[in-house]
Image: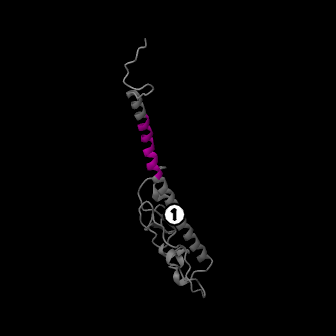
Amino acid sequence: MKRESCKSEPSGARGFTLLEMIITLAILSIVVAGAIPIARNAAQRQREVELRRALREIRQAIDAYKAACDAGKISDLERNSADDLCYPPKLEILVEGVMPKGTGTDKLKFLRRLPEDPMTGSTKWGTRSIQDEKGSSGGSQNVWDVFTRSDATALDGSKYKDW
């Protein structure tokens, strides 16, 4: 005589035990807890890359202005004074352009537009003048360098305004 089992579930069907579910949830929570800081840092890292690109673009335009001025391609009427050392009087000049020396009628432009500061969301940059004391800012006579106005700290621990 054959005895039949009194199981209520079909043969071969099996569910998860409570222990398996707890272990799975624990592993998932560890993975999620590790992914959140990585995603947050990725967004900040992207803004840092954009800041470096914008600073490089503006600094290259300042250098191009200086090279054109040193080569005598910029009209004396466009310059602040003889003591500006051939640096632009303000950042907007790089976009607006300057009249070339001689018969040229087209303005010399060094930037299409001022890049936006990704840390502040503005096109207002801090400027330094070559005549300023080391560590100070203000760009009172000409624009020798630019920096962000953000007081935030970078992922590497440095201040953005020191870049």
Is the stretch drawn in magenta largely helix, strand or loop?
helix
Secondary element at image label 1 = helix
Examine the rendering and report whether any part of residue 154 can be seen: no
Q: In x, y percent, where is residue 89?
A: 49, 75
As shown in the figure, which amino acid type bears the numbered disc 1? Leu
Please state which of residues 119 and 2 is positioned toward the viewer in this rendering. Answer: 2
* Quadrant in the picture for residue 107: bottom right
| Residue 2, position as x, y percentages in the image | 43, 13
Magenta-tinted stretch: 27-42
In the rendered view, would you say 91 is above or below 160? below
Task: Decide whether residue 129 is among the magenta residues.
Answer: no
Residue 105 seen: yes
Q: Residue at x 43, y 41 (%)?
A: 32
Q: Image quadrant of residue 106?
A: bottom right
Residue drawn at x 43%, y 11% is 1
Q: Residue furthest top?
A: 1
Q: Give how far across and how far down residue 105 sits, in percent.
A: 57, 86
Decide: is 40 above or below 60.
Answer: above
| Residue occupied by mark 1 | 55
